[in-house]
Structure formats: C-alpha cells, structure tokens
Image (cartoon, grey):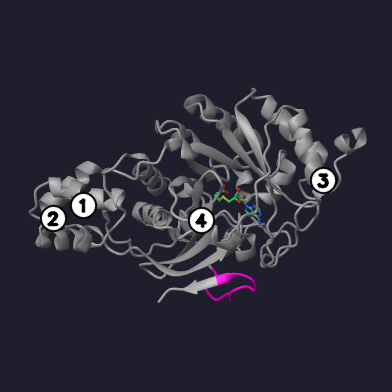
Amino acid sequence: MGDVMTQPPPAQPQVRPAHEGPGERPTLTFTARRRGKPPRHLADLTTAERAAAAVELGLPAFRADQVSRHYFDHLTRDPQDMTDLPAAARDQIAGTLLPELVTKVRDMQADKGATVKSLWRLFDGAMVESVLMRYADRTTLCVSSQAGCGMACPFCATGQQGLTRNLSTAEIVEQVRLAARASRDGDLAGGPTHLRNVVFMGMGEPMANYKAVIGAVRRMVEPAPAGLGLSARHVTVSTVGLVPAIDKLAKEGIPVTLAVSLHAPDDELRDELIPINSRWKVGELLDAARRYFEATGRRVSIEYALIKDMNDHAWRAQLLADELNARGRGWVHVNPIPLNPTPGSVWTASERDVEAEFVDTLRRAGIPTTVRDTRGSDIDGACGQLAAEVLDPPRAGTKEQEQE
Ligand code: SAH
C-alpha cells in the first residue's frame, strides 16, 4: 500500500459546474437580492418581545404565553384550538402573530414511508425542501436555512441552483414545528414518534444566514412555552467552513453539534471542490473546528462525500487522519457519505472496496468513522440533492402525494 499512500494520482480535471466556462471561478454569493421580508411571526420573537406584542394589541402579556404554548407545545397555529383564550384575543393574536409562512406543495415518500421529503412554498413563492427520517432509535429532520445556496459547490444540486434568499427564523422554525406535528400524529410509517434531532443539512449554508439560524436554534432548544424544547446536542449545524461564524457559534453558549463539510484534507483539491476554500483554508477550518470542540465539549463531525477517483484515495484518508490527530484525540469523528447523484454531475460515488479502504485507514489511525446512509436518494432527498425542483415529474417507484 506504501506507494499508493505517497504518490498522489492526478485529480480529475473537471470540477467546474457545467454552466461555467473553463477556467472561470465559481461565484460565491453571501447576500441575496433584497426581496420583501416574510411577515413577522411569533417564532421570530423572544419571550419578552412576544409579551410586548400582546400588550401592543391591548391584551394582557400572559396571553402571549398562552399562544406560545399552543404553538410550541401543542404544535398548532389554528385559533380554533386555543380554547383557553377569549375568541376575540385568539383571532387578534393568530391574525397578527401566526401568519401562514410555509405552505406544503407536496410530500414524497421513500423507505416505505419512513422517509418523507416535503416541498414548501414560502410567502413570496420561493421554495424549500425538508426531509423527515425515521430510524430505529430516533426521528430526525433535515431543515433548510436558505432557499438555494450561494456556496456553489459543484457536486451539490443546491449549490448549482444559486441563492434565492435567506429564510427568516420563523420560516426555519415552522419546518421543525410541522415535522414535530407530523411525527406526533403518525404521518411517518411505523406510527407516532417524537422528533428528536434537527440537522441543518437541507438547502443553504446556515453560517451565511447566521442571525436567523441562531434565532431558530434558540427557539428549538428553549423549553415550552418559549420554544420547542429540543436538546442542543440533538441539533446539528453543518457548515462548508465559514470560520468567523464557527467561532461566533462557539461563543453562544448553546452546545449544538457542529458538522464541517470538508470533503478534502488538502488545499489543492479543496480549492477545486469547495469554492469557499479560497477564503478559509483547510488548516484554518480544522483549527476553528477544534476551538469549537474546546469551547463546547461537543465532538465535531467531519463530512466527507466520497467521490470516485477525486478524493477517495487511501493517502488522502491518511492525510485527513494526520490533520485531525495533529489537533488532538477524541475531539472529532468522520462521516464519509457515498456521493449522491445530482443532475448533470460528472462524478459518481466511490467503489465499495475503495470506500472500505478509506474507512479502514481512518479507523486504523484512531479516528472514529461512520459511513452515512443515503436515505432518500431515490426521491432526491439525500445530501446534496435538494433543489426544490417543482417541475420534476415524480420518479418511478416513489409515491407522491399532492396536497390539495
Ligand atoms: N451548506 C452546509 C449545509 C448543507 S449539508 C454544508 O455544506 O455543510 C449537506 C451536506 O451534503 C454537506 O456536507 C454537503 O457537502 C454534502 N453534499 C453535497 N452534495 C452532495 C452529494 N452530491 N452527495 C453527498 N453529499 C453531498
């Protein structure tokens, strides 16, 4: 194996999105064109702001708590359900603080109903997707933080779409509330379940929409009636590597799990695969990940999509292990993800035996490594496949339910 480890084979030359000419750099987008703001929503507000909003409506402040309990605990925004409030107050509060922010366009099911991808229309017609997945021991929602994404990673369908706009805090929280309700009500195969995990691994770069994302995280982890009462450790924020935002997150005092989409241990390849690597290099990113671990005590996840003949060499697994071990032991684990197909992509997933060698190399170097499953890939619901492509006809073999 020695020569394999020391002799880097040439990388595939084609790492550019199909629509870009040869030699051009992909364009990174940090801010979206200004569009109208989503209407203000209860989930955008802190407890104090909600009380103030009730008072503004001429209602006693405690009405805000009652409505919050309905929303975050009973998971409803329907004034008819709020029977402990006087009818006039209900309609007033629901009318001003609980606008419909996300409307379901359709659900697609995979894994015999254990995975459901939902397509949502936002108030301005922007579209996002979320994916709810039931496992033997937990139920997990993958949420979107932006409509589209500005990070332009060439192997990711969302990245190829470009950024439409940032979501608001409440638009993110609504995805979670609706998934928690669907789980409770038995909409996933296997009967009622409790939504336990939320991963920011849907559309968008959460660290490029920091304020709304941290607001949503707060709403998720605050106990009812302030929030949904999830455990911070069960919330994962995944980033392509915006180093200053990672440091900021470390200081929030909310020990969410951090996932870093690394995909290459060396700048030469990462510069090609991940456009943001032009700003923050592998070393800076791993240093920030390590600081995150030190600040929070949370073990960091390294995401690594295994792309055939691109980044799957045993010597790169060894280099990755070395880079991680150089920053300490027991602070990190690696999640290799077999590459999921995306439209027009020139790449495929690594061969089985190559994947196995990559994993073994990491493990032999003492790095805990778990291959991520490709849940929902047959409904374009897996990592890197979310593109909110409403015009796509349903695929054969998947079940689609149109909403009215
Ligand atoms: N922008 C954030 C959140 C998206 S998470 C981030 O990059 O971390 C989605 C994960 O799927 C990321 O790790 C992303 O790099 C990975 N991914 C993108 N395209 C993929 C593909 N085609 N196959 C497998 N994983 C992919």
Alpha carbon distance from label 3 to label 4: 35 Å
**Amino acid type shown at disc 3:** Val
How far across and down, in percent of the image, does residue 58 sit? 7, 54
Could you tell me which residue is drawn at 66 percent across and 63 percent down?
Answer: 342
Where residue 354 is drawn, which disc sits there?
Answer: 3
Q: Earlier in the sequence, mark 3 or mark 1?
A: 1
**The stretch drawn in magenta includes residue 394:** yes
Q: Pointers 3 and 4 in contact (CB under 8 A)?
A: no
Query: For the residue carrying disc 1, how many other residues have a C-alpha within 10 Å: few (<14), some (14-19), or many (20+)?
Result: many
Q: Which residues are magenta?
A: 389-399
Secondary structure, mark 1, is helix
Label 2 sits on residue: 85
262 relative to 111, above or below: above
Of badges 2 and 1, the one in the foreground is 2
Q: Earlier in the sequence, mark 4 or mark 2?
A: 2
**Amino acid type shown at disc 4:** Gly
Secondary structure, mark 3, is helix
